[in-house]
Amino acid sequence: MQYNPGQRELTLKVVYYGPALSGKTTNLQMLHQLLDPQVRGRLMSLDTADDRTLFFDLLPVFFHTYGGLKIKIKVYTVPGQVMHHSTRRIVLSGADAVAFIADSQLSETRANTDAWNSMIENMRETALDPTATPVVLQFNKRDMPHVRSDADIDALRASAPHQIFTATAIRGEGVLETLCSLLQQAFRRVAQQHDVEATFGLGEAEFLRTFLERLAPAHADRLASLLAMGDAPRGGTP
Ligand SMILES: Nc1nc2c(ncn2[C@@H]2O[C@H](COP(=O)(O)OP(=O)(O)OP(=O)(O)O)[C@@H](O)[C@H]2O)c(=O)[nH]1
Ligand SMILES: [Mg+2]
C-alpha cells in the first residue's frame, strides 16, 4: 500500500500467482475486457514469442471514491515457469493480497502444490507474513476434462481459511468474482495495518460499493451479494 496525501491517492498492489500455464495472464486479459474502460488502463505484458510471461503483466485500475479519494490498483501476474523464480519474488514483494490461480486438471495437482509452497517461501523472503497476507484461491480451467471435482472443491471450501472460486478464465467466468474478493481482502489487510477510516475517511462498505459500481456496473448487484456471502472466514490450501 502506498498513500500520497498531497494527491489524496491510495495505491493497492495485488498479485496473481500460480504454476505455469494456469491462466494468470488470461485472467488479466479477461478483466481488461470486462472492466469498464473508464477505470482501467492498458494491459502491459512482456512475454516470449509463445505467449509465456517473461517478467510480469500489469493491469492498472483506478477510480475515485465519493469522498474524492483516488484509488489506484496495480494488478500484476508473476511468470509461472520454474526458471523465473527470482522474478516471482520481486513481483510478489509488497503485495496487499494475492490471487492463487490453480489449474483444476488432476495432472497439475503437483504443480499447484509446488507453486503454493514456493509462494509461501517467497512471502517469507520478501517480508510478507504468509499467515497475515490474504490469499484468494481460484481453481481455473473448469472446462477441461479430468479436473478436480466440484465436491472436492466444496470440501476444501468448508475447511480452508481462504475464499475459493472456480473459473473458466478463457470464457471470462469467475474472473470478476476473484478480483472483487481479492480487492475486498486487500482493503481489509490495509485497514488492519493503517487506520484507513481516520486517515482516508474510507470504510470497507464505501470502498466495496464504489469499486463495484465503478469497475463493473453491469455486474455490481451480483458481485455485491457474493461478497456479502463470502464474509465468513474460511480455510485451506490447494
Ligand atoms: N481450456 C482452458 N484453457 C485456458 C483457461 N485459461 C487459460 N487457458 C489457456 O491456458 C494457456 C496458458 O494461459 P496463460 O494465461 O498464458 O497462463 P499463465 O498462467 O499466464 O502462464 P505463465 O505466464 O507461463 O505462467 C493458454 O493457452 C490459455 O488460453 C481456461 O479456463 N480453460
Ligand atoms: Mg502469464
Image (cartoon, helix red, strand yellow):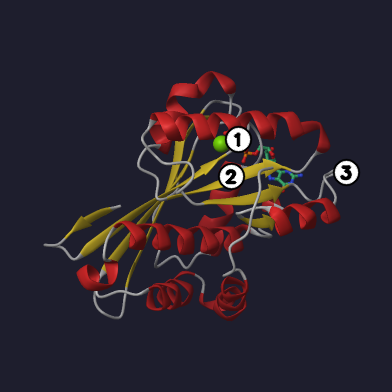
Q: For the point 78% across and 58% down, which residue is it?
A: 154
Compare marks 1 and 3 and give the one earlier in the sequence.
Answer: 1
Element class at badge 3: loop
Q: Quadrant of ligand 2?
A: top right
First in sequence: mark 2 or mark 1?
2
Q: Is mark 3 within 8 Å of ligand 1?
A: no
Nearer to us of marks 2 and 1 is 1
Q: CA distance from mark 2 to mark 1?
A: 8 Å
Mark 2 vs 1: CB contact within 8 A: yes
The answer to whether residue 167 is above or below residue 17 is below
Residue 226: x and y, percent? 62, 73
Task: Report the front residue among 43 and 124.
Answer: 124
Q: Nearer the viewer, residue 157 or 187?
A: 157
The residue where tag 3 is placed is 145
Q: Tell me the quarter of the picture where residue 186 sits.
A: bottom left
Q: CA separation, marks 1 and 3?
A: 23 Å
* Residue at the spot of label 1: 116
**Residue count near mark 1 (Cα–Cα under 10 Å), binned few <14, some 14–19, many ≥20:** many
Any part of residue 122 in sight: yes
- Residue 127 coordinates in the image, percent (x, y): 36, 35
Question: Can you identify the residue that label 2 sits on?
Answer: 100
Local crowd at mark 2 within 10 Å, few (<14), some, or many (≥20)? many
Badge 3 or badge 2: first in the primary sequence:
2
Report the label total. Answer: 3
Q: Residue furthest left?
A: 6
Callout 2 amino acid: Phe
Q: Residue 177's image quarter?
A: bottom right
Secondary-structure class at tag 2: strand
